[in-house]
Amino acid sequence: MSGHSKWATIKRKKGATDAKRGRIWTKIIREIQVAARMGGGDVNANPRLRKAVSLAKANAMNADNITKAIKRGTGELEGQSYEEATYEGTGAGGTLFIVDTLSDNKNRTVAELRKIFEKAAATLGTSGTAGWAFDKKGLLTIARAAADEDKLMDLAVGAGADDYTDQGDTWLITTPPDQLDAVAKALEAAGIAATEAKLGYVPKTKKEVSGREAEMCMRLTENLEDHDDVQNVYSDFDMSDEEATRLADA
């Protein structure tokens, strides 16, 4: 669930293990539960839940698991209660990180995140450490084959999107936070389903890293994303295509 297109490319080249697929489902189920608890179990009346269910379907989650997650969120079934928290830190080369979490034990989560940062020669900071370097945006991901550039520009930008970028096999559309649902609905009405729609963070500027610093940033990102309590990881690091290829083949 990282915001880096090159990071996504590296992960695809390395391949997804069954364990990682399982972790993705765990994260989605938590998001469904929290969305249902906060906004109710009606997908049509709860935009956050609708986004989470769409993501679940895009990741081949069966209807029974989705229904149970919704019922746990609304209290119809017993289940753990998760709280949202966002953490900020610094990585190699002065890079900045924002980490969204859903946890049933914040004290445990923050202790474990601190260890992950420390192992990457990074530091888990306080609120404001990294947030100033990012803009909050609506983020929509759609399959590259779902729309050509002209159609995407007409639909997305016409509905209020800020911009879109070609990320290889996907398009990433950015919107003002309050326009995310409007853009998503405009795409759906045209038969273009987003594989992911969420509020997230986009760096105002990017820091290019290479060599050891690139490896440390990638390791930190991967270890954070592998943690069950972490929902999203955002950073301002970037790297050349050549560097990304080197790391993917390592």
Image (tube, rainbow, N blue to C red):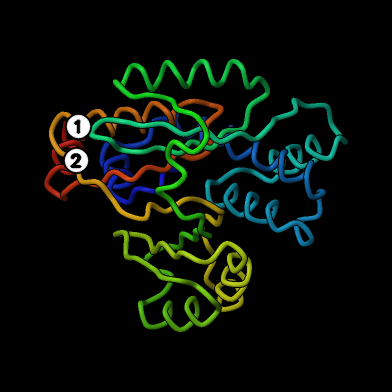
Name the residue beneath numbered marker 2: 209
Callout 2 secondary element? loop
- Packing grade of label 2 (10 A; few <14, some 14-19, many >=20) is many
Left or right, 61 with reference to 41: left
Question: Which residue is at 30% across, 28% downward?
Answer: 219
Percent coordinates x, y for residue 235 in the rendering: 37, 42
Question: Which residue is at 25% across, 28% downward?
Answer: 216
Disc 2 marks a residue whose amino acid type is Val
Callout 1 secondary element? helix
Percent coordinates x, y for residue 170 in the rendering: 37, 60
Name the residue beneath numbered marker 1: 213
Q: CA distance from mark 2 to mark 1?
A: 6 Å
**Residue 235 vertical position relative to residue 179 in the rendered view, above or below:** above
Disc 1 marks a residue whose amino acid type is Glu
**Residue 116 vertical position relative to residue 146 in the rendered view, above or below:** above
**Residue 22 vertical position relative to residue 159 in the rendered view, above or below:** above
Percent coordinates x, y for residue 192 in the rendering: 52, 71
Question: Which residue is at 37% across, 77% downward?
Answer: 148
**Residue 200 vertical position relative to residue 102 in the rendered view, above or below:** below
Q: Nearer the viewer, residue 137 or 181?
A: 137
**In the rendered structure, are the residues bearing label 2 and label 1 in contact, judged by CB atoms less than 8 Å apart?**
yes
Q: Image quadrant for the C terminus? A: top left
Question: Which residue is at 51% across, 58% downward?
Answer: 137
Left or right, 11 with reference to 181: left
Left or right, 86 with reference to 238: right
Percent coordinates x, y for residue 106 in the rendering: 63, 22
